[in-house]
Amino acid sequence: MHITLDRHLSTPLVQQLSEQLLAWIERQRLRPGTRLPSIRALARSQAVSASCVIEAYDRLVASGWLEARHGAGFFVAERKAGVQRDAGESWGEASDGRWRQFHEGHGDVLKLGCGWLPVAWRAEAELAQAIRQVSRGAAEALFDYCPPQGLASLRLQLHKGLARLDICAEPERIVTTQGASHALDLLVRTLLVPGDTVLVERPGYYNLYNLLRLHGVRMLEVPRTATGPDLAVLEQLLAEHRPRCLFINSLYQNPTGTSLAPKVAYRLLELAREHDLRIIEDDLYADFQEGPATRLSTLDSEQRVIYLGSLSKTLSSSLRVGYLVADSALVARLAELKMISGIGTSRFAEQVVGQMLANGSYRKSVQRLRLRLAQHMAKLLGQLEACGWEVFCEPFGGMFVWARVPGRDFAELDALALEHSVLLTPGSAFDPQGRASDWLRINVAYGQDVRAQAFFQHAGRPSAS
Amino acid sequence: MHITLDRHLSTPLVQQLSEQLLAWIERQRLRPGTRLPSIRALARSQAVSASCVIEAYDRLVASGWLEARHGAGFFVAERKAGVQRDAGESWGEASDGRWRQFHEGHGDVLKLGCGWLPVAWRAEAELAQAIRQVSRGAAEALFDYCPPQGLASLRLQLHKGLARLDICAEPERIVTTQGASHALDLLVRTLLVPGDTVLVERPGYYNLYNLLRLHGVRMLEVPRTATGPDLAVLEQLLAEHRPRCLFINSLYQNPTGTSLAPKVAYRLLELAREHDLRIIEDDLYADFQEGPATRLSTLDSEQRVIYLGSLSKTLSSSLRVGYLVADSALVARLAELKMISGIGTSRFAEQVVGQMLANGSYRKSVQRLRLRLAQHMAKLLGQLEACGWEVFCEPFGGMFVWARVPGRDFAELDALALEHSVLLTPGSAFDPQGRASDWLRINVAYGQDVRAQAFFQHAGRPSAS
């Protein structure tokens, strides 16, 4: 059994131990009934207390992975249909809520914490028209495979769009993907091996954490401040460890809505150069930009930053179109992996998106979205303040506000929300270790719904009352 | 350095050594300039001859991974943009031709060896109509994410279609994927760990080999005969090794076009039970079926067989819609990985396909395809015989004929083909080790083209001449 506990991490040892035991059980595919080491033996081999081992085992019993047999020890449990990798407490409290936003048939529940805009806000007429145009055009779009790097016409449009953000990305340096998560998966599989260490923001994107955990990559957490990652912590982690890369949202970060300040960005690139650190800049809210913005890819002159973009948030999550920009050698490896793991992306979807980028209908539709988001953001921030909510930092734009009600934990808020037919996403989902949190990600687009308004008022604690 | 050479494999030691060295260089991300062990030291540690090591090093020099410095030894080379993982000889001669079929702009070259049907054969009117209908329907199809297992309405239609093949697959046991290669990727990532051993057919699907190699899985090769895998070899490999699973095309195998005989299928399942072997049955030519056919999933009563299907060959490669059927516990893990690695499939594409399955237009279109394929197959087999070609086995149906011209190697055939504007796929691409082969996969749908006809005649050696 190969277990390495790190006393320098902020993650409690109990949690490290239970997670690594679970990973080991899965990796070894231990059969039900296999006996685990005794408490004493494990405590000795890992140099931890017996109570630490007991608690780690107990957690795995509670989540259905182990069973305790009186007097005989702990054994791998029979897998029940309901007990999946995401069911254990060790995978974070997010497990319960993680995919529930994605299931069909929620009836009239308002997904206040979800990560996308309402269908009613989207460019329905424009997208439907582009789809019909492509369906009447060259038959190749309907039937053929896509080339390994993606459709050349789409990559040309993406190149032009990036040039407007002062990002120089020749079409040859772009690979299309099935959204940003797919881009992250390709990158993790190409750049990292199990046991590698990387830097992630806390709070941050839950599915990135899932992906890194799945790949056996160790995460070092950098707190996200109002102006970007906490540089003091970052410097210390860089000095003590040798992380291979940093994953970051520069603009309108998910879930805090904060954006990178120019000084922070500049220092970040300096540190990256000093420590030979790669940066993966996930810029999927790029097209929501209002006013000036700071991006690492704009400042970077040494191809140290890998840039990700996606049309899922601004145009359609259904079409699955995203992309990444990297140096040519990496692009070739990523395109190869993209073919091996799925024979590429959808030519039809890329043709539709490319057409909307070319004919200007995409640009017009995101202008509408930006205006609407800005109005909703302003209203919501005022209302939350009036209701006694605390906001982490007032965002300059984007879709998210990170907020809480001092003194109320998630369980309390969740119960109140359900009374008002509101579905929340727990703050713990945005913590790399799934630690409990009283913060909530609020999607501003849903904030003016009567159910959300009732929830804000009932959950809030106005200072006047 | 961890290298394990297996003297029981049919793969030459030199090839095993060069492949494992390459994998090690990549895994360790050795920097350019890193020195490799001396020839003598490596020969001693691996108990092979010095000439074996020299040849392995030379291959890596030839493919640009290493450089030899006179008198000083072998060093990791600077990576050039053109030198990618697929460029080395050790990755098979397929490298040159592997993705060339997928690139845009081939002009008027006939892709005689490609793996899909011509656009002109496809159900253009029906697919375009379904797309337009979906574009006018509920906006969710245009904008929303898909649930983790895939759209329920599509899974219901797939379930009904499988019932007609006597495969019992409740919608709850189906996960949709972005085609069969994506399904294979999800399975390999979920079921296998690096170092595992599996059984593959030889010749077989090149992208499965790529995927297994990428994942560090060892392949044991079972020759494909006219009636299925060679059972004598299979039994011996099962007795000597403990492979975790077997990958197989039961019907119209790629590339030989052969189908499983009932007796072989029955014995195969018996062996699988005895050796606790999982079988992954990739049935992507299912809907080309003419007359009776034998499938392992139909016979299997213990959920030992995982079934894959795809709409890429019969309907559209552009939409990226495939699926797999497995037991519920595995389905939950696969759906989880599908979300983590890409937030699922395209709702739009699944809605379009589901609609064509439901309204009968898909069924009508594959009936037309079957008839056309059967006519082309009969003609082609007659012509090849007349031109002095040798056919591995006359297929009962499907898209492929596996054929050669006795005495002509691939280089010769390829040169002749290019003279007639015909693009071939080398037989070596269908060999797990990329060994040279004089066999060619011929796609019957392109066989009546004048360029193909001229090539068959010029390359062939009629006995009368």
Image (cartoon, coloured by chain):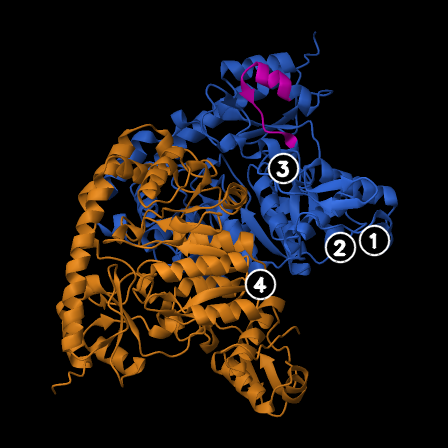
Chain colours: A orange, B blue
Report how far apart the C-alphas of labels 1 and 4 lie in the structure: 28 Å
User: Does the rendering let one see residue B74?
Assistant: yes
Of the numbered discs 2 and 3, the one sitting upstream in the chain is: 2
Circle 4 crowding by C-alpha within 10 Å: few under 14, some 14–19, many from 20:
some
Q: In the image, which residues are magenta?
A: B414-427
Quadrant where the C terminus of chain B is found in the figure: top right
Contact? badges 4 and 2 (CB < 8 Å): no
Foreground residue, B72 or B265? B72
Towards the viewer: A325 or B276: A325
The amino acid type, in three-letter code, at marker 4 is: Asp
Q: Position of residue B156 (x, y in %)?
A: 35, 53
In the picture of the structure, the residue carrying the numbered disc 4 is: A196
Give me the C-alpha separation between circle 2 and circle 1.
8 Å
Classify residue A261 by image quadrant.
bottom left
Given residues A381 and A302, the one toward you in this image is A302
Q: Are marks 2 and 1 in contact (CB under 8 Å)?
A: yes
Report if residue A84 is visible in the image. no
Name the residue that disc number 1 marks.
Answer: B46
Q: Secondary structure at mark 4?
A: loop
**1 and 3 marks on the same chain:** yes
Q: Are marks 4 and 3 on the same chain?
A: no
Q: Chain of mark 3?
A: B
State which chain disc 4 sits on: A
Q: In x, y percent, where is residue B403?
A: 64, 26
Classify residue B75 as left or right of residue A445.
right
Residue named by callout 3: B87
Q: From the image, which quarter does the N terminus of chain B lie in?
A: bottom right
Q: Residue furthest bottom?
A: A71
Q: Is residue B356 above or below residue B8?
A: above
Please give the name of the residue rendered at 63% of the width and 80% of the height, measured from the top-left corner: A36
- For disc 2, the chain is B
